[in-house]
Image (spheres, rainbow, N blue to C red):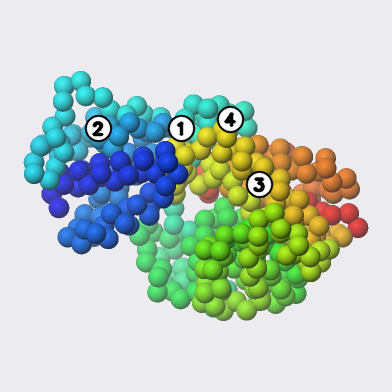
Amino acid sequence: MTPAARTQAAIELLDEVIAAARGGGAAADTLIARYFATRRYAGSKDRRAVRELVYAAIRRAGEVPASGRTALLAIAADDAAIAATFDGSTHGPAPIGAGEDAAPAGVMPAWLAEALAASGVAPEQQAALIGRAPLDVRVNRLLADPAALADQLGGTPIPGLPDALRLPAGTNIDTLAGQAEVQDAGSQIVSLAAQAQPGQRIVDLCAGGGGKTLALAAAMRNQGQILAADIDRGRLSRLMPRAAKAAVTIVETRLLDPRREAEALADWQDAADCVLIDAPCSGTGTWRRNPEARWRLTPDRLAGFAAQQRHVLAVGAPLVRPGGALVYITCSLLDAEGADQVDAFLADHPGWTPAPLDLPAGSARGQGRRLDPASDDTDGFFVARLIRPC
């Protein structure tokens, strides 16, 4: 592909990303994969260059751009090499017209900036939310030694996380066969709030694909019992193959029907040493990996997430044994999804008490702790550990 053809491809992809953001379509990564699946002529360098252009344009535009062309024009305004590719060639974009508008630069939609500011997220912390994320992995001690893998992969240990490595960008870990899982350091840190021990019985109530489930199993040395439950059949179906590859045998999965969860979980009532709730949320803490997600969020969607969070907390609380713990996690920096939810839960559940958290990163926020990219070099998370009365 010529440089001009790469720019045109990025414009076409950005048009798809913008349409998906407005209409609730697929994520940018999925759209990029689909695009190149039908364009076999594009080599690996071409795909990488186009992908970088697309994400640079997404990160630069705080509001949804009018079109892919306006999004790329904003990049061209600061990069003469990109501007030169608007040359009108056969496979390239039309020349830049006099006074042609480019998408305005910004970090995020104004209403979101205001909501984050009200949640104590300073402007420099907001800007860091759309930076580039590192490649972090959790070494699976059931199959591998962190020091040996660090030597093999050229990874750097992450302070406070003996099983974590930060790898050079582009490291291929597909051949590790369960020895390591891609997992952001922040996700590994908040998982520590479960204080998982061998022999315990733990429920991972919003297990999804099982990243935290497998972290819990490793902490338990594959001894005990984990129930991994979710309402999303597709995501949950990926968990057991991952568990088998990781040599984890203590996990049972359970698909739940929305609004009938309590019935399906009756056999676990008052029985779990810990219930971990990685609740559905806006994902404001994961914009480094999914920057177009900030274009999808609306006040109504945020209110919907808050309602789901209240619901899963109500489902999870009765499963905790007396004296056991409920660990509430969201990958969001908004108080509406973090500290405020915990305050509301404690008000509705007399006798439950927040427990102090000794974690290697984060700062106090309400009755829990919060991590953010600017302060902790992790994705953004809120976590709280709540103890049921005996």
Q: Which residue is mark 1?
A: 108
Q: Residue 190 sits in which quadrant?
A: bottom right
* Residue sitting nearer the eye, 27 or 352: 27
Residue that sits furthest to the right in the current view = 390
Label pair 2/3, CB-CB below 8 angstroms: no
Give the mark, 3 or 4, whose residue is nearer the N terminus: 4
Q: Which residue is mark 4?
A: 115
Please give the residue where the numbered disc 2 appears in the rendered image.
73
Q: Which-is-in-front pick, marks 3 and 4? A: 3
**Cα distance, mark 1 to mark 3?**
24 Å
| Secondary structure beneath label 1 | loop
Nearer to us of marks 1 and 3 is 3
* Amino acid type, label 2: Leu
Between the residue at mark 2 and the residue at mark 3, the CA separation in whole angstroms equals 39 Å
Residue 54 is tagged as none
Q: Residue furthest top?
A: 99
Label 4 Cα neighbours within 10 Å, binned few <14 / some 14-19 / many ≥20: some
Q: Position of residue 67 (x, y in %)?
A: 30, 34
